[in-house]
């Protein structure tokens, strides 16, 4: 009898230890999120119960993550009610070794009492025309010039801060876009020509067009300006060598400002170029017009070459801006910010580290009015900006994130972040222009 009692105590002790070990172990959670009709819900965000830590988002209704048991997580979705979920082993949940399978259903949000909130979100639209596709946009002082696609027509429309139309002009051409040069003049660019846009207080018009070749030989090289003083820049074809000069607009003489050169990557390119040319020459000499397999091998070789060059290097990104009668050069290759007078005299240089963040999007933006510089970062499918302190070379202020996934064509004016967004999940949804307050 005593042996039986001892065995029972030992058995209960082992079970307790097993349960304790199970609670402290990590498990793979396979979570399926559905709507009320059993259809998968995409972009449902999973957080820790206190909502301080993002865990993952559903794709095709599924998300996988690691967790200890028992635990709690919170589910959030823009179109569904938030829900808290317990992670535990019970008869209702499938459990296999170190994996827990869970299924949860979300209920649609009711917007009957959220009229004010919905209107506030719609006010982020700069131009709330349901039928207009915003191809491009540019700032002209306090107004915004929109390049719109309306049906089969292309229209330029000037709108004020309330989105009200001031003037419009029908345009034609292939591959249309707007371009703002270093003097802040706005141009309409087509496949073959460029036309400067002339503005008055209440209207705008197109000036005589000139060829893209003329632009590429002149204005394209101007990177920043202060009055009649310019910084011009020239890049090699691999964008591993940039030469900056200062000059007056009405003079041809140039003064060297700085050269930024990545010799290591350039040497690698040159070696690969030589190897590729040798391989391609050999392949062409042995190929015949009728031998499709050999011709296909040459095309594969060309694709491999383009892919290699794309993956091998990041082009040097070292932009120049003008602010407060000073040229500012951001040399991300040597981690420094240099300040120059308008005549090209170096004033000071400070170090920087903001670009070493693994989420950096290799992009800077300048506020159209204030001249402040912002650095752009990516986090999953969103982009966010942060102001750069030009006294310390560090990031200042909080992060401002885009409200939509995969935004494009980001710009900043007067403390507002502008971007284009198209909801690809909605059939025939137009691309639209949004703005978010930064300050």
Image (spheres, rainbow, N blue to C red):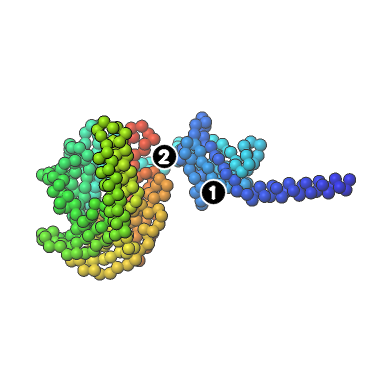
Measured as percent of width and height from the top left, residue 293 is found at 32, 34
Q: Kindly indicate the quadrant of the structure image that contains residue 356.
A: bottom left
Q: How many marks?
A: 2
Q: Pointer 2: what residue?
A: 115
Quadrant for the N terminus in the image? top right
The reply to whether residue 274 is visible in this rendering is yes
Q: Residue at left 21%, top 64%?
A: 257
244 or 60, which lies in front? 244
Q: From what the image shows, is residue 228 above or below residue 426?
A: below
Q: Residue at left 65%, top 39%?
A: 90
Q: Which mark is residue 48?
A: 1
Label 2, secondary structure: give it: helix
The reply to whether residue 41 is visible in this rendering is no
70 or 66, which lies in front? 66
Measured as percent of width and height from the top left, residue 285 is found at 25, 40
Q: Residues within 10 Å of mark 2 (few under 14, many from 20)?
A: few
Measured as percent of width and height from the top left, residue 344 is found at 20, 66
242 or 253, which lies in front? 242
Q: Residue at left 32%, top 67%?
A: 350
Label 1, secondary structure: give it: strand
* Mark in front: 1 vs 2: 1
Q: From what the image shows, is residue 9 above or below residue 338?
A: above
């Amino acid at each position: 009898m005593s042996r039986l009692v001892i065995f029972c105590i030992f058995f209960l002790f082992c079970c307790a230890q097993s349960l304790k070990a199970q609670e402290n172990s990590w498990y793979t959670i396979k979570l399926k999120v559905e709507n009320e009709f059993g259809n998968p819900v995409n972009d449902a965000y999973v957080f820790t119960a206190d909502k301080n830590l993002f865990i993952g988002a559903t794709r095709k209704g599924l998300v996988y993550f690691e967790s200890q048991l028992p635990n709690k997580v919170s589910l959030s979705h823009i179109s569904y009610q938030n829900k808290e979920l317990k992670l535990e082993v019970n008869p209702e949940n499938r459990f296999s070794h170190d994996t827990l399978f869970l299924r949860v259903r979300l209920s649609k949000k009711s917007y009957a009492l959220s009229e004010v909130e919905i209107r506030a979100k719609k006010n982020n639209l700069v131009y709330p025309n349901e039928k207009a596709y915003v191809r491009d946009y540019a700032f002209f002082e306090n107004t915004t010039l929109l390049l719109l696609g309306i049906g089969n027509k292309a229209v330029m429309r000037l709108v004020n801060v309330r989105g009200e139309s001031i003037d419009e002009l029908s345009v034609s051409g292939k591959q249309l876009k707007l371009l703002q040069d270093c003097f802040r003049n706005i141009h309409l660019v087509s496949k073959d020509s460029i036309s400067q846009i002339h503005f008055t207080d209440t209207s705008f018009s197109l000036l005589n067009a000139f060829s893209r070749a003329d632009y590429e030989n002149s204005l394209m090289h101007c990177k920043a300006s202060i009055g009649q003083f310019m910084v011009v820049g020239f890049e090699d074809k691999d964008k591993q060598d940039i030469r900056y000069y200062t000059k007056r607009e009405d003079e041809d003489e140039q003064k060297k400002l700085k050269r930024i050169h990545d010799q290591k990557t350039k040497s690698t390119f040159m070696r690969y170029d030589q190897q590729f040319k040798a391989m391609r020459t050999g392949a062409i000499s042995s190929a015949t017009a009728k031998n499709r397999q050999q011709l296909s091998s040459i095309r594969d070789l060309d694709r491999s070459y383009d892919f290699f060059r794309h993956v091998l290097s990041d082009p040097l990104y070292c932009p120049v801006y003008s602010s407060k009668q000073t040229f500012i050069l951001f040399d991300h290759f040597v981690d420094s910010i240099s300040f120059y007078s308008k005549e090209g005299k170096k004033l000071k240089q400070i170090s920087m580290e903001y670009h070493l963040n693994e989420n950096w999007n290799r992009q800077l933006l300048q506020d159209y009015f204030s001249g402040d510089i912002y650095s752009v970062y990516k986090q999953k499918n969103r982009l966010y900006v942060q102001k750069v302190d030009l006294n310390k070379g560090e990031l200042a202020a909080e992060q401002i994130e885009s409200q939509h996934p995969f935004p494009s064509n980001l710009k900043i004016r007067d403390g507002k972040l502008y971007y284009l967004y198209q909801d690809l999940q909605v059939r025939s949804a137009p691309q639209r222009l949004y703005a978010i307050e930064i300050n």
